[in-house]
Amino acid sequence: MALWGNKDDKTSTGTVAIAANGLVTGTSTLFDSELATGDYLRANDLDHLVTSITTNTNCQVVAGVPGATLAVVAATNAVSYSEKPKYITVSESQGDPVKVFGVDTTEVGVTDTTHAGWVRRTAGTGGRNGRVQFEVLVAGSSIAGDAADDTQLADS
């Protein structure tokens, strides 16, 4: 079973442009086989939640953070996909998917997290500057192996 979070990307091919209405036009993309409704499409360092897929080169997205305005992304931007949990965007008051990481069983042993799964990592500011808080959103004790998020959650 794969575990996806902020740095855990699925295979992605091609480049994209995103219009103000959320229409994504891909070049050499394979949306039908690499992307699914509910996945996140990341372009120009912004997350977008995929709401529908029409073809290998066309899909529809909304802003990946609640209340955010959908940003236009110029053509030829590299793209990555992620299976972050959708409810992080659509129903949480702190629904910023950039703060969510996939944490595997190895990382649990070397970080302050208490359980493998999808974990929100929040760095403190102001009087809490330098403090990091972890909140397990979805536990997954059988998760082993993840992508490179070692800057935030080291494997060893």
Image (tube, rainbow, N blue to C red):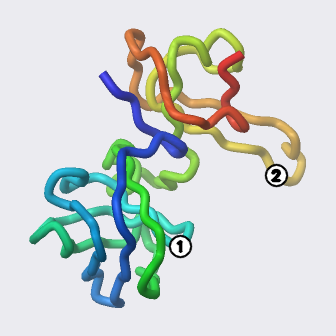
Label 2's element? loop
Label 1's element? loop
| Residue behind mark 2 | 125
State the image coordinates of residue 138 (x, y, percent, origin top left): 39, 27
| Residue behind mark 1 | 44
Residue depicted at x 20% and y 73%: 57
The answer to whether residue 145 of the structure is visible from this angle is: yes
Residue depicted at x 85% and y 43%: 128
Circle 2 packing at 10 Å, graded few (<14), some (14-19), many (20+), is few
In the rendered view of the protein, which quadrant contains the N terminus? Answer: top left
Q: Which of the 4 image quadrants contains residue 21?
A: bottom left
Q: Which of the 4 image quadrants contains residue 131?
A: top right
State the image coordinates of residue 148 (x, y, percent, origin top left): 59, 36
Query: Vertical placement of 66 versus 120: above or below?
Result: below
Q: Amino acid at mark 1?
A: Asn
Q: Amino acid at mark 2?
A: Thr
User: Mark 2 or mark 1, which is nearer to you?
Assistant: 1
- Residue 122 relative to residue 82: left or right: right
Farthest-out residue, left: 54
- Residue 59 relative to residue 45: left or right: left
Circle 1 packing at 10 Å, graded few (<14), some (14-19), many (20+), is some
